[in-house]
Image (cartoon, rainbow, N blue to C red):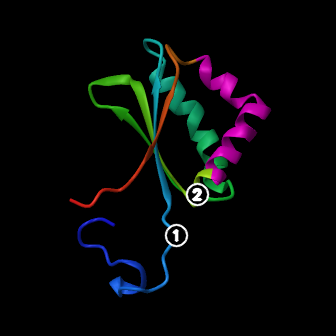
Amino acid sequence: MLVGEAGPNGGVPGGEESTMSVNVHVAFPCQEGRGPELVEFMRTAALGARKAPGNEGIEVFTDADDPDMVIHLQTWTDRAAREAYIATLVESGAMEQVSAFLAGPLQSTYLDPTDI
């Protein structure tokens, strides 16, 4: 739980636990000059991701100091939903299309919220 957030049942101890969404940070290191092209490609692909079962949101960013580093922040109902979506991307060939823009492997990081 993050600072300022109410816990399950409004923070009532002993209440029913809530299911937390899964947040994922994905870094796409693109070949020189290809970052903007990948972002354009993703404009269409992101529509499909946003409609995928279990997707709660996706934001796409570029590094302010390196436009060839594209970042996704994704929120899913659970890890299985994201993994199912990734499997459909692999099966459809979309991941192969994305890899054509990359200078190296993409890196996915599952994030745990931390109370500070």
- Mark 1 residue element: loop
What's the residue at 44%, 86% (across, down)?
A: 15
Secondary structure mostly taken by the magenta-highlighted segment of the chain: helix
Q: Quadrant of the N terminus?
A: bottom left
Picture layout, residue 14 above or below residue 85: below
Amino acid carrying mark 1 in the image: Thr
Between disc 2 and disc 1, whose residue precedes? 1
Q: Is residue 62 left or right of residue 36?
A: left
Q: Residues within 10 Å of mark 1 (few under 14, many from 20)?
A: few
Query: In x, y percent, where is residue 76?
Result: 55, 56
- At 38% across and 33% down in the image, what residue appears? 62
Is residue 61 rendered magenta in the image? no
Q: Position of residue 35 (x, y in %)?
A: 46, 23
Q: How many marks?
A: 2
Q: What residue sits right under mark 1 in the picture?
A: 19
The residue where tag 2 is placed is 78
Q: Amino acid at mark 2?
A: Asp
Residue 66 - label: none
Q: Quadrant of the C terminus?
A: bottom left
Residue found at x 59% / y 51%: 79
Range of residues picked out in magenta? 80-100
Q: Give whichever of 73, 50 is nearer the camera.
A: 73
> How much space separates mark 2 and mark 1, taking CA atoms?
9 Å
Residue 82 appears at what percent x and percent y? 62, 48
Rate crowding at label 2 as few (under 14), some (14 to 19) or many (20 or more) other CA atoms within 10 Å: some
The x and y percentages for residue 104 are 50, 15
In the rendered image, the vertical position of residue 56 relative to residue 7, given as above or below: above
